[in-house]
Each structure stands twice: as structure tokens, then as C-alpha cells.
Amino acid sequence: MEKKKILIVEDEASLQGAMQDFLLAEGFDVALAIDGEIAVRLAKSENPDLILLDIILPKKDGFEVLTELKADEKTKKIPIILLTNLESAEDIDRAFSLEANTYLVKSNYKLEEIVQKIKEMLKMPK
Amino acid sequence: MKITNDFDLKKQAEELGVSVWRTPSFLFIVMGIIIVSAMTAIYFISKEYDQPEILIGAESLVVIVIFIIGNSIIKQVEEMAKLNKLKSEFVSVASHQLRTPLSAIRWETELLLSKLGSGMDEKQCKSVATINTLATRMTRLVNDLLDVTKIDQGRMVLRKEAVDVSKIINESVEDLLPLAKAKNLQIMVNKKGEIKEIIADSARIRVVIENLLSNSVKYTRTRGRIEVELFNSDGFVVFSIKDDGVGIPAEQQKQVFSKFFRSDNAVRYQTDGTGLGLYIAKNIVEQSGGKIWFQSKEDTGTVFNFSLPMA
């Protein structure tokens, strides 16, 4: 079976590294973006199967990235998980109104649980 | 009793962190004394002099004095409110800043234990697991502090969405299974009939359920039993979490939902906790239109119940 590719959009190196290593060990392909601009570019060029998107990011924040990707024919179907430490009702509602597929608060989840969510969304066997 | 408490100036000054003569109550008393003396003075002035100019002058003077003192009281209160807000903002910013490194510690240690652990011996694995557990506990503390800050500022905004209660209960029970197994506890989940849909904030309801369940696991002795029940009742969905644990001493039951409350039993059995879980749970449940209540008997057990309105 072909490997599924995940685009990780995260500017914090330590979180990025842990996510990347865990996903690689789980058999995923991984692409990394450290700011919003790179995220949009890679989403278009790398054709990821799913995007893990932080909100507070340099250059373009997660909401802007989400808006752009959902407005583009080429990227609008890619499932996007917002993965952030912001957790206000306003932020969550805004994310869903911009068609985010799921919203997870980083500090509440283990990597294993995040991978479970990814597999669920990509309809992969757990 | 309440009134004497309100005028316990020393206590108030300590609580507000200001000197006694700057407490609103003290200034209020001063204002009262000035008003009474001014009235008496005006009475004597009006008796002595019958020119209206003098009377008007005296009254104007009193109005000015009252205005100045009133203004100073308002300023004090405003200043205190500002300080309070600043304190809350500090907690909020500090907590957010703490979450990222805490997530990193938790994820890196999880990675070490699950994917990169082959080179570590048992002792090393145990150390890493301890770091992971402690970082998780600290994350919970930070989350609790953030929630309490939001509650105290009236900024806890709850979302409205369909809540899959059964799923939350199953997941929360599953999360606690390692801890329950370590103590040889039995957790039974019993759903009575078709549970009606509720509209609430899913993530927050999960916090309530997790808080109540983890309390039950913490305060139930080895080989104990925890029963979770879910049923419909009079337009509400009721959750009931019953344990045969150490219970809450009768004389402390009134304080159960107070901030930072920890019962003597909790301390005696050396369980970790912040004393914020039930305070947060009560606020979330009530803000969601429900109720929370409990019965408990020391050394026999506790039942916590909460209800949420059906959609």
C-alpha cells in the first residue's frame, strides 16, 4: 500500500520533531512547513493526504492558511486537523466555520491519539 | 454575621493587598461620618443664620466633600479591579506559554517510550515514564488554572454542539483503566435505555466527566468498585458516578465545590490533586443549564450526579 503523506505545519521545533518522528515510525511520509506561506506552497506542490495545522504561525496564521486552502480547487478536499494550544470557543467556532475537519488542543492529546484521529480520517485500519 | 464580615477592615485590607485606610469599607465609613457631621452642622448653621446664601454655601460644601470621597472610593475599586484583571491575564499568558514546552516534554517522552525505547533498559524506561506522567499532571494543573481564571472573569464561553455522551464516557473510562487496573478496581458502565441527545460543549463536558471519574478512581481503595450510570429523567440526561471509596467527612461536605478545597481524606490518602476539579465541574455544568449534586458517607463511598438538559 502506498504511504500516506502528512503535511505538518508547526513553527515550534521540539513539537515538530516529535510529531515527525512519531509519524515516520507509524509508516507515514512527512512534509514539514515552519510558517504559513511555506504551508500553502507545500500543500499545493506535495499533495499531502492530510494536513496538521497550527494556528499561531509566522507570516500567515493558521486561519489564513485554512481559508486559502479551502478556497483552492486543488487543495480544498485535503482534510485539515487544526492542532493548536488555543482553545477558546471563538477560535474553535471560527475554525469550523472555515471548514476545518477537526480541531484538537495539543496539550490534551498524546501523539498516539493524534495518529488514531489521522487514521480515522483517512479511513485506514487502526 | 455577613455585615460584620463586610466591615472586618483588617481582613479586607489583607485580602485586597492594600492598607486599611484605602479599603472601600473604611472610606465608606468615613463618608458616612462626614455626611452625618455635615447634616448636623447644617442643622446648627440653619438655626443660627437664616440667610439662604450661607445655607446653600454649606450644602454645596457638603456635596463637594461627598463627591471627592465618593470619587476616591470609586478610584480605589477601579484600581483593584484593574490589578485583579492584570493578575488573571498574567495567569492566562503564563499558562499558555507553559503549554507548548509541556506538550513537547510529553510528546518527546511518549516517542521515547513507544518508538525509540528499544535501546533503553527497564530503569531508564521507568524514569522516562515518570517524566511523562508528571508532565501530564502539570498540563492538567495548567489547564485547571486557565479554566478557573476564565470562570472567575466570567470569560468561560461554552460551545453548542451535539455531545456524544456515551463516547466521552467510554473514552474517559479507557483513559483511567491503567490507573484502575493498578488498584484492581472494577469500573462498570450502565446506560439505561436510549440516551437522549444533549447540546453542550463537548470538550468541557469531557472535563467534567474526567474530573468526577478520576476522583472516584483516586479515592476508592484497592479492589473497590465504581459504577457509572447514564439515564434520562424529566427533560434531563443524568450522569451518576458511584464509588465505594473513602468518602467525604460530613463536616466538610459543604465546601466540596469551593475553589482549592481538598478533604482531609484526600490529604490523608496522599492523592495528588489541586482542589479545582469540582469547582470547575460545577461551573461548567451550571453554565450548561444543568445541576450537580452528591451524597457521601465517610468510609462507605460517594455518588456524584450531574444533569444536562436534553436538546
Image (cartoon, coloured by chain):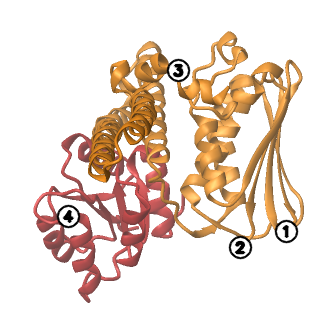
Chain colours: A red, B orange
Q: Is mark 3 on a helix, strand or loop?
A: loop
Query: Which image quadrant is residue B116 in?
Result: top left
Q: Which residue is drawn at 24% across and 47% down?
A: A16
Q: Answer whether labels 1 and 4 touch (C-beta < 8 Å).
A: no
Q: In this view, does A60 lie above or below B92?
A: below
Q: Mark 1 lies on which chain?
A: B
Q: What residue type is labelled 1?
A: Glu
Image location of residue A10, percent across then percent down: 23, 54
Across and down, in percent, residue B91 comes to 34, 36
| Camera-side mark, 2 or 4 | 2
Q: Mark 4 points at which residue?
A: A61
**Residue plotted at (39% across, 32% down):** B34
> On the image, numbered disc 3 is attached to which residue?
B8
For the residue marked with disc 4, what is the amino acid? Asp
Mark linked to residue B194: 1
- Taking depth in this image into account, of B46 and B183 the one nearest to the observer is B46
Q: Residues within 10 Å of mark 2 (few under 14, many from 20)?
A: some
Vertical side of B239 occupied by B99: above or below: above
Q: Quadrant of residue B87?
A: top left
Q: In the displayed structure, would residue A108 be above or below residue A66?
A: above
Q: Mark 3 lies on which chain?
A: B
> Can residue B125 be seen in the rendering of this structure?
no
Question: Gap in Å between the C-alphas at discs 1 and 4?
Answer: 43 Å
Chain ID, mark 4:
A
